[in-house]
Image (cartoon, rainbow, N blue to C red):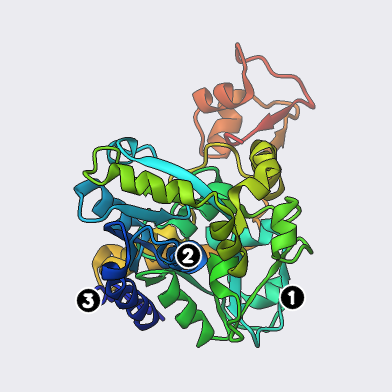
C-alpha cells in the first residue's frame, strides 16, 4: 500500500537540466554575472524558466536553474550556495526564514489533481479538507468509483505547495495530513498521480498546464483557470515568491533580477505559463484574509487546529519506518477509526423495589443481598423510615 519515492540523487529533472546548461553557456554573451536559482519545480516551471530567458536576452546576465524543492532552495540561499530561491509559500516564521526576504512576484492556483481518467471532476472545500484529514477514504464518497483515494504528498514539511494548501484548509501550514505516499517534489508527485487512476495530490495550475495525463478538479463548482484565480472566485490561489539573502555578495544583482520581474518582458513570460503577474492580481491581496475565513468556515476548521489529523500519525510514521512497532500500532488505530461504529447499547434499566407492609431497610437489604448503607446512599435516605408504596433503587443507577 505504501509507495515512498524519496529520490534525492538527482537535483533537477532532465528538461530543467538542459535549460540550466543552456543558461550557463550564455555567460560569455551576457554583461552580468551568473545567478544561481534553486527552489521548487513548480515555481521554476511557472515563473523562473521563461523569465530567465527574457533576462538573458536583455543582456543582464545568465540564470542557472537548479529546480528541486522549496526547502533545498531556501537552505541554499541562507547558506550562500544559491543567489535566489523560488517558493510557493511565504516565510514560515522560522529563524532561518526570518533572515531572508520573501518577495511576491506572481499569483498561481493551488490545484487538487487526479488522473485524467478519473470520473470525478469536482470536490467541495469540505471534501478536500476531509480527504487530507483522513475522514474520507473512498472515491465513492465523493461521487466516484468504489476505490480507495490514494493521497500523495511531498515529503518535505516546508514544501511550498503543500504548506500553502494546508494553511488554507487547516489554518496552519505544518498541519500533518493522512497522505502515506510521499514524493521528493511536485513533479515526482505528478508522475505518481498520472500513473494511478485513484491518485490525488496537490500541484500548481501553471505546473500541470498541457499535461493531458492529469486534471485539476473544480472546487465547489469553480474551475481552476487563470481568469478565476485573477478575480478570486477560485479561492485556492497563492502568491509565488522569490527568496533572497540581503547579506549576499551579489545582493545588488539579485535585486536587479527581482525588479526585472515587474517589467513588461517578464510579465509576458509569466502569462505564457498561466501565471498571473503580481500587479495584475493586486485585488487578491485585499481578498486574502476574508477568503481564508471563508475557507475555514466551509470546512468547519478553527483558526487553531489539533496537532494531528486522524490517520496522519500512521502516514507520517509509515514514511519513515513502515514496519516499526509504533507504525503498526498507528495503522491498527487508523483501521479501527475506519471501522463502522457499532450501534449504541441501551443502558440496563435500574432495579426498583416497591415498599410493602412489614418492610424495613434491613429486610429489603437482606432479601436482595445488599447492605442498609447502600440502600440509604442510593436512595438519599436520611433515616430508616419507609412508607408503603415508596419506590427504592436497588442499584447505583
**Mark number for residue 143?**
1
Q: Which residue is mark 2?
A: 54
Q: Which residue is mark 3?
A: 9
Q: Residue 14, position in %: x, y?
A: 35, 83
Residue under the image location 58 percent in, 71 percent down: 137
Between tags 2 and 1, which lies in front? 2
- Circles 1 and 3 in contact, beta carbons < 8 Å: no
Counting residues from the start of the chain, the first of labels 2 and 1 encountered is 2
To which quarter of the image does residue 124 belong? bottom right
Residue 101 showing in the rendered view? yes
Q: Is residue 213 above or below residue 279?
A: below
To which quarter of the image does residue 246 belong? top left
Pick whichever, 280 or 262, lies toward us.
Answer: 262
The quadrant the C terminus occupies is top right
Q: Residue 317, position in %: x, y?
A: 32, 63
Q: Secondary structure at mark 2?
A: helix
Amino acid at each position: 500500500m505504501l509507495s515512498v519515492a524519496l529520490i534525492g540523487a538527482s537535483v533537477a529533472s532532465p528538461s530543467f537540466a538542459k535549460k540550466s546548461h543552456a543558461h550557463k553557456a550564455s555567460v560569455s554573451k551576457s554583461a552580468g554575472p551568473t545567478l544561481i536559482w534553486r527552489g521548487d519545480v513548480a515555481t521554476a516551471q511557472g515563473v523562473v524558466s521563461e523569465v530567465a530567458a527574457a533576462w538573458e536576452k536583455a543582456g543582464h546576465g545568465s540564470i542557472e536553474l537548479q529546480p528541486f524543492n522549496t526547502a533545498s532552495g531556501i537552505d541554499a540561499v541562507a547558506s550562500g550556495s544559491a543567489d535566489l530561491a523560488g517558493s510557493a509559500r511565504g516565510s514560515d516564521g522560522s529563524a532561518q526564514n526570518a533572515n531572508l526576504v520573501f518577495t511576491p512576484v506572481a499569483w498561481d492556483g493551488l490545484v487538487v489533481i487526479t488522473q485524467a481518467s478519473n470520473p470525478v471532476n469536482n470536490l467541495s472545500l469540505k471534501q478536500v479538507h476531509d480527504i487530507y484529514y483522513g475522514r474520507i477514504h473512498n472515491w465513492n464518497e465523493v461521487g466516484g468509483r468504489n476505490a480507495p483515494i490514494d493521497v500523495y504528498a511531498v515529503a518535505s514539511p516546508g514544501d511550498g505547495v503543500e504548506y500553502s494548501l494546508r494553511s488554507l484548509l487547516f489554518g496552519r501550514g505544518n498541519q500533518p495530513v493522512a497522505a502515506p505516499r510521499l514524493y521528493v517534489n511536485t513533479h515526482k508527485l505528478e508522475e505518481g498521480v498520472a500513473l494511478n487512476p485513484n491518485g490525488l495530490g496537490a500541484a500548481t495550475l501553471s505546473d500541470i498546464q498541457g499535461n493531458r495525463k492529469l486534471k485539476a478538479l473544480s472546487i465547489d463548482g469553480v474551475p481552476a483557470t487563470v481568469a478565476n484565480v485573477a478575480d478570486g472566485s477560485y479561492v485556492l490561489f497563492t502568491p509565488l515568491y522569490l527568496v533572497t539573502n540581503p547579506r549576499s555578495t551579489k545582493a545588488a544583482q539579485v535585486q536587479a533580477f527581482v525588479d526585472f520581474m515587474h517589467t513588461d518582458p517578464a510579465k509576458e513570460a509569466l502569462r505564457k505559463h498561466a501565471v498571473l503577474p503580481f500587479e495584475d492580481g493586486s485585488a487578491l491581496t485585499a481578498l486574502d484574509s476574508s477568503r481564508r475565513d471563508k475557507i475555514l468556515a466551509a470546512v468547519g476548521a478553527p483558526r487553531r487546529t489539533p496537532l494531528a489529523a486522524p490517520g496522519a500519525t500512521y502516514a507520517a510514521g509509515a514514511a519513515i519506518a513502515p514496519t516499526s512497532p509504533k507504525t503498526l500500532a498507528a495503522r491498527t488505530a487508523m483501521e479501527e477509526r475506519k471501522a463502522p461504529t457499532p450501534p449504541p447499547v441501551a443502558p440496563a434499566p435500574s432495579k426498583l423495589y416497591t415498599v410493602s407492609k412489614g418492610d424495613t431497610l434491613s429486610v429489603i437489604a437482606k432479601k436482595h443481598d445488599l447492605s442498609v448503607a447502600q440502600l440509604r446512599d442510593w436512595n438519599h435516605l436520611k433515616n430508616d423510615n419507609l412508607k408503603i408504596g415508596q419506590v427504592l433503587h436497588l442499584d447505583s443507577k
